[in-house]
Image (cartoon, rainbow, N blue to C red):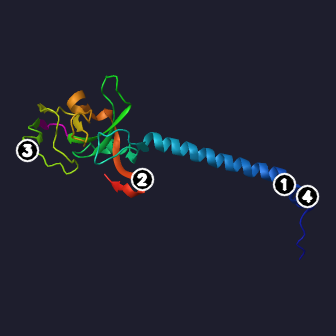
Amino acid sequence: MSREIPPDIENTATTSSSGSTLSGELLDWLKTILIAVVLMLLLNLFVFNISIVKGESMQPTLVEQDRLFINKIVYEFDTPKRHDVVVLHDPSHTPDRKEFLVKRVIGIPGDMIEIREHVLYINEEPQTEPYTNTSIEDPDFGPIRLEEGRYFVMGDNRHAGKSKDSRSFGSVSAKEIVGKAEFIFWPMSDMKKL
């Protein structure tokens, strides 16, 4: 039995030029890169974000230039919890307004918040705050009760005047919270879960 290749198939195989193969391969690479870029943009828009810490309001937990992984989808399925470190839109209307702030959730809906004699009270219970390195140096605050869907946020830096937070701009809504800071990923020496 003879295994001859029909002449028309043989000619097709031998007339393919290397120029068209190179351009086809280049087109495949460009498609792959474009799909990867679009996928990363969509993930960045809806699922996660990378943020750089600016300022000292979250010291000692976070320091200037720490890189954070922000989970933007977690609060689509759950609500912020007390002690979560969150990124939120700056609700203030002052000249030093920033686009985003990083703060810790101190109070959740229904909580009574008060700062008395440099101690934080939640629902009339004094709080131990292991994430801070000093007692609250700013003036006393409250008491206030948080309404449904409202959160009280503060920076971990409790030195006088070091954190712009709910003591100055009030409680924030769940809609103002962009996502949860899950962990520091850079510098590697400071890598940790928050």
Name which of mark 4 and mark 2 comes first in the sequence. Answer: 4
Does residue 111 belong to the magenta stretch? Answer: yes
Q: Are marks 4 and 1 in contact (CB under 8 Å)?
A: no
Q: Residue 96: x, y in percent?
A: 34, 26
Which tag is nearer the camera, tag 2 or tag 1? 2
Q: Which mark is residue 187?
A: 2
| 186 relative to 165 in the view: left or right | right
Q: Quadrant of the N terminus?
A: bottom right
Q: Earlier in the sequence, mark 3 or mark 1?
A: 1
Q: Which residue is mark 4?
A: 11
Cα–Cα span, label 4 and label 1: 15 Å
* Of callouts 2 and 1, the N-terminal one: 1
Q: Amino acid at mark 3?
A: Glu
**Which of labels 3 and 2 is toward the front?**
2
**Amino acid at circle 2:** Pro
How crowded pointer 4 is (Cα within 10 Å; few <14, some 14-19, many 20+) is rated as few
Secondary structure under the numbered disc 3 in the rendered image:
strand
Q: Residues within 10 Å of mark 1 (few under 14, many from 20)?
A: few
- How many marks overall? 4
